[in-house]
Image (cartoon, grey):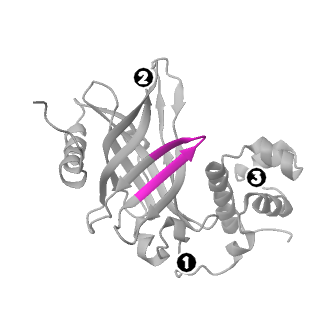
Amino acid sequence: MSTIPTEVASQITAAINRAIMMKGITQLMIAHDTGYDPKTIRKMINGQSVHPQTIIDTCEYLGVDFESFFEQKSDARVADDEYGAYNYASVQEYLGDYYLYRRKFDPHMTCVCSAVKIFWSDVVNALAFHHDNKSSDASGATIDHSQAGLIHISPMIGLIHMVTIAKGAVRLITLHRMRFPENFLYGVLLTQSDEKLYWKPSVSPVVMEKVAVGGIPSASAFGVVAEKSERYAGIANRLALAEKQFVNFAVHAAP
């Protein structure tokens, strides 16, 4: 193959980047194992022009089906059993970009807004997600807690489970299915928070708001939403609804 059409090349590059995130593989590992120069691998991952064979070899290394990008996609795709065996056509409404809101794990009245993208992964044959979760510390340095994972949907109970597993650490977001036409998903986040001396299991109600089709998430919306912000009341009310109506907490009043 002498060239790859630009539109197809961009789709393959996106699939390669998703596979890298989900498998936890570095650019240097790809270069070492495939025999290519690290600069060539970096160019390819950044969407720059490289020889088609480089892309083909990288796809083979990552388990990305290169040939599938030149075939007509079918809506009859079905997730593997371990993810719930859900049909692509029954979940395609969930594909797209979202704002994710949760309470911040600190004593202040603050919430956090970050970005989530849900997409179908032909690498693992299931819905997958990427959570773009960056923030700044007191010095202004960027802290990157971005994560990627796979989505499990049980046909028995219908809840959506967004699972991240990295080096033995597990994060779980469980959501109720979307009540159309409302573009909100309500649920709970179970993760770990750093308390300086040790880590604590941490729980927060969570709400995901789908961005309108064709829309682009606003970068200015991301980050901490303080109580004095105009957006705070609306987000806090949604999170309170998640707590009261969509999640059971086994908390008992003190005697």
Q: Secondary structure at mark 2?
A: loop
Above or below, 159 relative to 28: below
Question: Is 143 included in the stretch rendered in magenta?
Answer: no
Which residue range is magenta in the image? 161-171
The residue drawn where x is 49% and y is 47% is 131
**Please, what is the three-letter code of the amino acid marked with disc 3?**
Met
Name the quadrant containing residue 69.
Answer: bottom right
The residue that label 1 is drawn on is: 77
The residue drawn where x is 47% and y is 69% is 84
Q: Is residue 105 left or right of residue 130?
A: left
Q: Which sits in the foreground, 213 or 108? A: 108
Q: Which class describes the residues within 10 Å of circle 1: few (<14), some (14-19), or many (20+)?
A: some
- Distance from label 2 to label 1 (Cα)? 43 Å
Q: Secondary structure at mark 3?
A: helix
Residue that lies at the very extreme toward the front in this rendered image? 255
The residue drawn where x is 33% and y is 54% is 209
The residue drawn where x is 50% and y is 65% is 83
What is the x, y in percent for residue 196?
46, 19
Q: Secondary structure at mark 1?
A: loop
Q: Main secondary structure of the magenta part?
A: strand
The residue that label 2 is drawn on is: 195
Numbered circle sitting on residue 44: 3
What is the x, y in percent for residue 58?
79, 57
Q: Is residue 244 left or right of residue 107?
A: left
**Please, what is the three-letter code of the amino acid marked with disc 2?**
Glu
What is the x, y in percent for residue 73?
60, 79
Q: Nearer the viewer, mark 3 or mark 1?
A: 1
Q: Nearer the viewer, mark 2 or mark 3?
A: 2
Q: Is residue 248 left or right of residue 203?
A: left
Q: Quadrant of the C terminus?
A: top left
